Amino acid sequence: MLLMLASSVASAVGMGRLTVLSSLGQPLNAEVDLVSVQKEELATLSARLASPDAYRQANLQYGAAAAGMRFRIEKRPGGQLYIKITSVRSVDEPFVNLLIELTWASGRLVREYTALIDPPDYTPPQSVASAPAPAPETRPVPVPQPTVAVAAPASARPAAGGEYGPIKRGETLSKIAASVKPEGVSLERMLVGILRSNPDAFVNNNMNRMKAGKMLRIPDKEQLTAMPQADAVKEVRVQAADWKRYRRKLADTAGTVSERKTAASRRDKVSVKDKTADGKPVLRLSSGEPPGGAGAKGRSKADRVQALEEELIARERALKEANERIKELEKAVKESAK
């Protein structure tokens, strides 16, 4: 649930979905749609990042990624107004808390977003969703927001403190965490809480490598809220960094196997050389070996090539599954905050 604050009840200016267009390791490039802006409000409308003090009051960390961001009100060709958000320095953290303050002559609006910044090796449909957290204001006027229920997985949606499972192949921890997260508990706390409560359900203790068929113990709200938010955010960042290294290793291994396969194929290539005196062509291996004994050795090399191809296919399949899991992570975060 989102709490949106304004100094004027009559005004219906609002901030909609935030979409990130950049990737990890790049300067931030994001957009926030504006809704219900009146012509008379446009002249005085401005957006900025809330102050560090406002971040503290909202129990949010004003990190290095937030410093130096620029906000501009712009208009798309179709007339849609939006906030353009950019940064000078690159963003190297998978989660960025944005507390955006929108002001105009007769009102003020503050909204918090948790941005999920994806790796640069794939393009997500939309990589950001709003996060539940109240923003501070001296005269708050809550504006009701429509809520969209997150569909529970087929394994059934348990209450906090219960169990979930068995885990189905293709499910992600982020989607599960979003579906069982109690109100008032951050997604980061939920992710880390489930991970710590179920060490046997994850490969190498990484939340992105969940084992199918396992049952998950869901920690209760008291356990989750006892965890410092800063610790949960730090753990998620460490997990994301480990996941990036794992995926990079998969990609590097797949590339190495591909190169070895190509080299082996070249060695096994045969060609027809000059004809002999009697007019019959002589079949030679490109490596220069004589025809005698080439059949057995050629079959051995072919077996090695086949083994390399099978290894490459397995690596590429694992890399594809890794990308699909990250897409599920983004989708779950987006749906959980609607």
Image: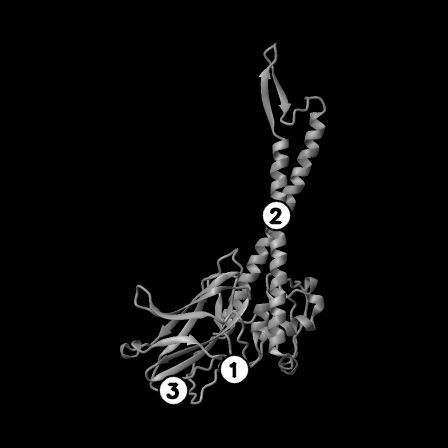
Front disc: 2 or 3? 3
Which residue, given by chain and number where applicable, does mark 1 sit on?
58
**Which disc is residue 254 wearing?**
2
**First reached walking from the N terminus: tag 1 or tag 3:** 3
- Graded by Cα atoms within 10 Å as few (under 14), some (14 to 19) or many (20 or more), the crowding at tag 2 reads many
Q: Is residue 191 left or right of residue 143?
A: right
Q: Position of residue 209 (x, y in %)?
A: 64, 62
Describe residue 1's horizontal placement relative to residue 105 as left or right: right
Q: Residue 156: tell me if it is visible.
A: no
SS type, badge 2? helix
Q: Which residue is mark 3?
A: 7
* Spatial CA span between label 1 and label 2: 45 Å
Q: Residue type at mark 1?
A: Ala
Compared with 69, 243 (above or below) is above
167 with respect to 76 (left or right): right
Q: CA distance from mark 2 to mark 3?
A: 56 Å
Q: Amino acid at mark 2?
A: Ala
Between 318 and 22, the residue placed more toward the observer is: 22
* Helix, strand or loop status at disc 1: loop
Q: Is the residue under label 3 in contact with that under label 2 (CB below 8 Å)?
A: no
Disc 1 + disc 3, Cβ < 8 Å: no
How far apart, in angstroms, are the residues tagged by discs 1 and 3? 18 Å
The colour scheme used to paint the residues is: one colour
Q: Is residue 329 visible?
A: yes
89, above or below 38, in the image: above
Bin the neighbour count of mark 1 within 10 Å (Cα to Cα): few under 14, some 14-19, many 20 and up.
some
Front tag of 1 and 2? 1
Going by the numbered disc 3, the residue's amino acid type is: Ser
**Which residue is located at x 27 percent, y 79 percent?**
40
Sequence-first disc among 1 and 2: 1
